[in-house]
Image: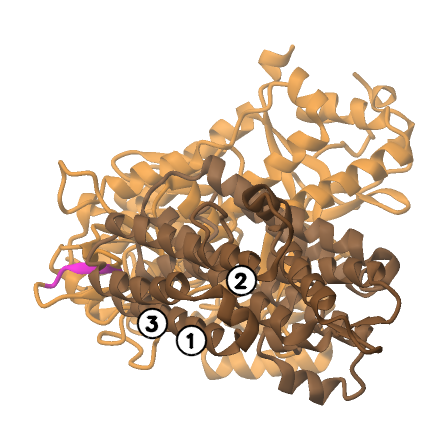
């Protein structure tokens, strides 16, 4: 496998997963906002911080607000992490490696891209947004499905899986942090416990984890077990630990992987050693930042081992 | 079948020249009978729907070429017209034989030019032309590529004049493109007219990638092993990038860019892979000679691979087409192809050249200068339809400019009569209208010679235009070689 192609496969799956998470994040929270009890307010700004693009946002949309956040996170070409830009990046990369993956992947991604280009403006209006985001999520999952069903488990496939897993671990840590920063705020003297529960519910739902969590927990909802689930579950495919364990398991199919494995184990230790109870009390930001840095150095190791030309 | 059989849709259709589907009397030509009767039975709405479906299919398949405009590269879909061009199998057999003969002679010529230069010594081909050829590569002198083949892939452009004669307009021996459109156009046409493919004997075109693979694999310097073959592309901003992907994918070979390759101290060529360096045996290069190797040619090239010429000359890697093959697709050298056929093969040319005037010869040059208003003047080494003068459409000022250009550098110009290129109907908003076309078949040379079934029909979409190049607003059609004996 060419180093350049391996690099492209890795980034293609990262961008695809990023777009999907982004669509889900905005979609779920838009729904959630509609269900909030009177007196509670949804704070959209943490979603922007989640993706680390608050500076651009403040500059482009000084007034903020729900529509501005949705536009910025979904379809703004000036936001390097927007859903539209992530999909466009995935498509551009795919163009340069389209001989590597089944043609239907190209058809599907190309179709999503055209759909989004034509429907973006209308699609962010609240009436249509849900539908647009559902199409993007479905499209991304359809591509994942095609890849799973139709791509040989050769070395190239391992780079696709690496990209998906690493991006998901990263997005999960970011969404956890957004939730902890407080997506829901109260105008009244608050019932802190209620708000906190709602916040963690929204985090779970943003990661499509609420149902799986409930089946797993079989108890009254509480934030710490939810956080533990998202960080440490070995069964839920979007948990940080699950993604890192998956990376570790596929490494032996790659050549000279030892430095990469060491970086995986460092990141994995951060997730598994975390104490959810105290994080819920004291805040998750420090740990999530640390996890993101560990993931960034894992990305560095991959580049040194396989992508550097 | 007479003119009635083709339906009223064709009643008003008139071409000012030879039409590939319909005679001047308004009757269907033999290979088009079935098609025209069928199209005649569709109403405007049916036709519109099919044209729309074709456009959609092309868009979804991502059939594009890249053009540079407004400071950014954009993907354009090649305009596709649903009405195919038809050719009888009998005519195609003869054309195929003519191309086989022509490309065989061209390969002998290139080998001779970089070898003994017998044709020059025997005074059939003037030495002066060679010394001024911009495509002659001194770096290639003395090299003996495998099987003696230099131009493994040739795309020859054929045009038909008003009297029905099929001429060769030029041979592209460097990095001819368009074959992927030929294959994809057929995929689109099958979606649009599944009924016709069921009932007519339309010969398939999809074996090309397998034939190309065999052509390339035969060149490996390490016979016995499964060869590692790569297609070298300039990258995603090249106008033919879509084709590079398509071919690499269809053949299951690696698509590489210059930075993916390097030549080691052992003069072998390697790819950079996640496992480390892997040796490459054959490179189907779609990068121009001068960008191929900064060590041998353009030192600023970032598209190529340093040392590649060294590896090629040492016989450690095969290049297709071989560097230097372009010496024979110079438009002035072109005029000598009939002589080459007689000289190397001792045969009469089956396909005629478009008649040409050489500006190096005084009498012909004088004629050209006096008749600029009725001739097409071409520079020797441009492609893509650039730098030409189309006399009948030119202004006095343009003609004056070309007069000066020719007198300043006669070797660099040749002229041809303005042919009234044949037409094929296209579907427009006001029904069927004639548009001019050419035809580019692709010829593969190895121990034997393979010719595509038909080729790429390019069509000038603008009324009256003679320029079919995709870079200048041309479109494409599917090309059907029809076995009429079998169909009846």
Query: In the figure, is residue A208 to the left or right of B362?
Result: right
Q: Determine the residue positioned at 39% across, 55% down.
A: A162
Q: Colour of chain A?
A: brown
Query: In the figure, is residue B121 to the left or right of B454?
Result: left
Q: Earlier in the sequence, mark 1 or mark 2?
A: 2
Q: Which chain is orange?
A: B
Where disc 1 sits, the SS reads helix
Q: Position of residue B440 (x, y in %)?
A: 53, 46
Q: Are both tags, 2 and 3, on one chain?
A: yes
Q: Position of residue A269 (x, y in %)?
A: 34, 64
Residue closest to the eye, A185 or B370: A185
For the magenta stretch, what is the residue range?
B267-272
The reply to whether the magenta stretch includes residue A83 is no
* Pointer 3 residue: A300
Height in image: B232 above or below B207? Answer: below
Alpha carbon separation for disc pair 3 and 1: 15 Å
Where disc 2 sits, the SS reads helix
* Pointer 2 residue: A172
Query: In the figure, is residue B132 to the left or right of A138?
Result: left
* Pointer 1 residue: A290
Q: Are both tags, 3 and 1, on one chain?
A: yes
Where disc 3 sits, the SS reads helix
Residue A16 visible in the shown view: no
How many residues crowd mark 2 within 10 Å: few (<14), some (14–19), many (20+)?
many
How many residues crowd mark 1 within 10 Å: few (<14), some (14–19), many (20+)?
some
């Amino acid at each position: 496998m060419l180093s350049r192609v391996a690099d492209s496969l890795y980034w293609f799956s990262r961008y695809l997963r990023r777009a999907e998470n982004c669509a889900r994040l905005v979609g779920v929270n838009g729904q959630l906002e509609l269900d909030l009890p009177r007196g509670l307010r949804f704070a959209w700004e943490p979603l922007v911080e989640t993706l680390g693009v608050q500076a651009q946002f403040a500059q482009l949309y000084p007034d903020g607000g729900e529509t501005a956040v949705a536009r910025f996170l979904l379809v703004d070409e000036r936001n390097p992490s927007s859903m539209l830009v992530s999909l466009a990046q995935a498509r551009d990369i795919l163009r340069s490696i389209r001989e590597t993956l089944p043609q239907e992947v190209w058809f599907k991604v190309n179709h999503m891209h055209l759909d989004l280009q034509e429907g973006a403006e209308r699609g962010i209006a609240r009436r249509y947004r849900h539908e647009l985001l559902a199409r993007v999520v479905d499209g991304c999952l359809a591509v994942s499905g095609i890849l799973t069903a139709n791509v040989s488990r050769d070395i190239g496939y391992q780079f696709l899986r690496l990209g998906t897993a690493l991006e998901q671990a990263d997005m999960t840590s970011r969404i956890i942090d957004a939730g902890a920063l407080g997506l829901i705020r109260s105008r009244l003297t608050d019932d802190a416990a209620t708000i906190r529960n709602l916040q963690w519910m929204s985090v779970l739902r943003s990661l499509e984890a609420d149902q799986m969590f409930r089946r797993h927990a079989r108890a009254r909802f509480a934030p710490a077990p939810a956080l533990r689930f998202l960080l440490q579950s070995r069964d839920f495919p979007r948990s940080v630990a699950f993604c890192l364990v998956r990376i570790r398991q596929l490494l032996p199919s790659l050549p000279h992987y030892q430095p990469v494995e060491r970086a995986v184990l460092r990141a994995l230790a951060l997730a598994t050693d975390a104490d959810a109870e105290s994080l819920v009390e004291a805040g998750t930001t420090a740990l999530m930042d640390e996890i993101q840095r560990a993931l960034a150095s894992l990305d560095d190791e991959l580049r040194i081992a396989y992508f550097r030309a | 079948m007479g003119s009635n059989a083709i339906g009223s849709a064709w009643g008003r259709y008139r071409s000012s020249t030879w039409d590939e589907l319909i005679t001047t009397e308004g009757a269907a030509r033999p290979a088009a009978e079935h098609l025209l009767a069928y199209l005649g039975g569709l109403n405007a709405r049916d036709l519109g729907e099919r044209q729309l479906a074709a456009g959609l299919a092309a868009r979804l398949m991502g059939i594009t070429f890249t053009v540079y405009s407004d400071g950014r590269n954009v993907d354009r879909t090649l305009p596709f017209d649903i009405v195919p061009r038809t050719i009888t199998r009998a005519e195609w057999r003869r054309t195929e034989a003519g191309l086989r003969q022509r490309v065989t002679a061209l390969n002998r010529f290139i080998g001779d030019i970089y070898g003994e230069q017998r044709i020059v010594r025997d005074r059939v081909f003037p030495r002066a032309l060679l010394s001024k050829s911009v495509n002659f590569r001194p770096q290639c002198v003395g090299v003996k590529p495998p099987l003696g083949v230099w131009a493994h892939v040739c795309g020859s452009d054929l045009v038909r004049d008003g009297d029905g004669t099929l001429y060769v307009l030029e041979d592209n021996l460097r990095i001819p493109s368009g074959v992927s459109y030929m294959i994809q156009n057929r995929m689109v046409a099958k979606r649009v007219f599944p009924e016709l493919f069921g009932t007519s004997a339309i010969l398939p075109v999809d074996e090309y990638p397998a034939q190309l693979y065999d052509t390339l694999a035969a060149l490996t310097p390490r016979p016995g092993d499964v060869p590692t073959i790569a297609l070298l592309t300039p990258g995603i901003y090249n106008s033919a990038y879509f084709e590079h992907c398509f071919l690499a994918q269809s053949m299951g070979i690696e698509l590489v860019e210059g930075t993916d390759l390097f030549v080691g101290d052992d003069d072998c060529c390697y790819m950079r892979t996640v496992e480390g360096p892997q040796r490459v045996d054959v490179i189907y290069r779609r990068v121009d000679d001068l960008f191929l190797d900064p060590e041998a040619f353009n030192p600023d090239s970032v598209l190529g691979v340093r040392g590649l010429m060294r590896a090629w000359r040492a016989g450690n890697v095969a290049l297709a087409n071989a560097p230097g093959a372009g010496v024979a697709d110079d438009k002035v050298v072109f005029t000598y192809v009939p002589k080459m056929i007689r000289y190397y093969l001792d045969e009469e040319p089956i396909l005629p050249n478009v008649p040409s005037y050489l500006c190096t010869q005084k009498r012909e040059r004088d004629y050209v200068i006096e008749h600029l208003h009725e001739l097409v003047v071409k520079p020797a080494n441009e492609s893509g339809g650039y730098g030409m003068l189309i006399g009948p459409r030119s202004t006095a000022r343009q003609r004056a400019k070309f007069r000066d250009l020719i007198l300043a550098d006669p070797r660099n110009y040749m002229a041809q009569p303005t042919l009234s290129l044949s037409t094929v109907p296209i579907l427009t908003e006001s029904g069927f209208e004639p548009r001019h076309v050419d035809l580019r078949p692709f010829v593969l040379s190895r121990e034997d010679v393979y010719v595509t079934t038909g080729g790429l029909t390019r069509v000038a979409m603008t009324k009256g235009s003679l320029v079919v190049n995709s870079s200048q607003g041309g479109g494409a059609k599917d090309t059907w070689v029809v076995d009429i004996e079998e169909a009846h």
